[in-house]
Amino acid sequence: MLDNENRLYVAHSDHPLFIEPKMANRHGLIAGATGTGKTVSLQVLAESFSDLGVPCFMADMKGDLSGVYKAGTLSKFIEKRQNEFGVQFEFQNYPVQFFDVYASQGHPLRVTVKDFGVTLFSRIMSLSETQEGVLTAVFKIADDKNMPLDDLKDLRSMLNYVGQNAKDFQTEYGNISSVSIGAIQRNLLALQEQGGDLFFGLPAFDIDDFFAFEKINGIKKGMINILAADKLYNSPRLYTAFLMWLLTSIYNKMPEVGDADKPKFVFFFDEAHLLFSDASKTLLEQIERVVRLIRSKGVGVYFITQNPMDIPENVLGQLGNKVQHALRAFTPKDQKAVKAVAQTFCTNENLDAEKALLELETGEALISFLNEKGNPSMVERAKMLCPQGQIGPITEEERAEAIKNSGLERKYGQTLDRESAYEMLQKIEEAKKKQEAELAHEKEAEKERKIQEKGQKSVSKASSKKQSAFWSIIGKLFTSFGRTIGNALIKSILGGKKTTTTKRRNNNVR
């Protein structure tokens, strides 16, 4: 809630504790062990930013934050807090947009493979340096060939294509190992089983849709964008890479504003320790750079985690507004962590921060906000205010109603599948098969033609032989016939002469 000077009134010690609006983009931290009140504190801050007219985004791990959609109700505990603080809570509902990567509890949030980028893919698939280099080459080849990478089937097809033609790309893009291609493909299969095929695709989410406002009772309030993360949390690498993509996209989208009277947007990063565990050096540098520079664009980032020591020192040092709930110290290591956390606060001589961290009750916290000059205030032990929206989840019917009425269903409800790398490579493959079939047909036709020619030559040769044989026979016949006739004629002639000679001989005798 806000005070009369439009400051964010979020906690109370023996006096109200405020977050100065113009210092709200200097980032913040909500930390504490499980069950100490982090979720309610997150809801209080989100409602206060909405009251200030600042849209925000937060992930909902258990569905509890959805209650902000409905007005809260008075309970004995809240009534006690009101009397203790001397304030009257105005229970009210807030404008909410629900999102869900799996599209079951909110509007789908999709991103193209190309926009997600190599670095985050390497993060969620735990790729080696060599494998990341191969993936970089695949992205570059797709870009050079104007083959859009929209969804996972595009990427898988592109990997197959590059792997099969690795020798053709080796000179320009470097060595592309079939082993690395296979490893990436296996990781993509695992990612697909985690729901990656639902996350990557079109229509891609437009970050501008986060920056929405709605009038409630005549007052302009910032939109509270809630991501259903109960399923997504079971795939921690995908969850953190997705949120990092969102944060980076917001950073790239927002213009420089310098020092503003209030933030343009606030991003709550829940279970932040997952972001930094096993993160590569490249990713850590990217996170640090975004957190450091994004405040100049009017964006505040608030990390929510169990132990502040899970956050790298370079990032932790940039978190100016702190809400630290109780910590547990069951081991020597835990005790060292408690001491280290206590030392991150600006000292208060009247408060033993280390001791207080172990004594805080649910809903209590050690508070230190930046003052008007940007300096951290002394740490104070305080109680968080109660939310003005409902504490706890709404019903499925109420969620469905909110999704239907948000106006985003028409824009993101249907998946689009344009012609991209997968379809283009299919056409290339079909054209290749067609060409191969045509060549095979031509070869078969040529083979058949040669066989026919050979057959015709054989027939012609056989025919020629037959004709030769025929005429040979005819010749022989004629020769034989001629000889017979000749012999007959000779005999006839010789026979006639012999008769005449005989007659002459006989006459002489006489």
Image: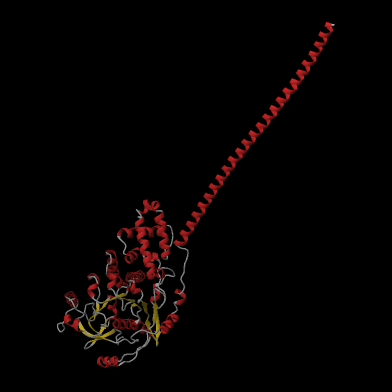
Residue 371: name its quadrant. bottom left
- The quadrant of the image that shows the N terminus is bottom left
Q: Relative to the observer, which residue lies in front, 24 or 183?
A: 183
Residue 236: name its quadrant. bottom left
Which residue of the protein is positioned furthest toward the front in this rendering? 510
The picture places residue 510, in percent across and down from the top left corner, at 85, 6
The picture places residue 485, in percent across and down from the top left corner, at 75, 23
Q: Relative to the observer, which residue lies in front, 229 or 296?
A: 229
Lateral position of residue 489 relative to residue 32, left or right? right
Q: Is residue 317 visible?
A: no
Q: Residue at 28% x, 64% y: name it.
A: 282
What is the tally of numbered marks visible in this picture? 0
The picture places residue 466, in percent across and down from the top left corner, at 65, 34
Q: Is residue 91 above or below residue 340?
A: below
Q: Is residue 443 visible?
A: yes
Q: Relative to the observer, which residue lies in front, 274 or 79?
A: 274
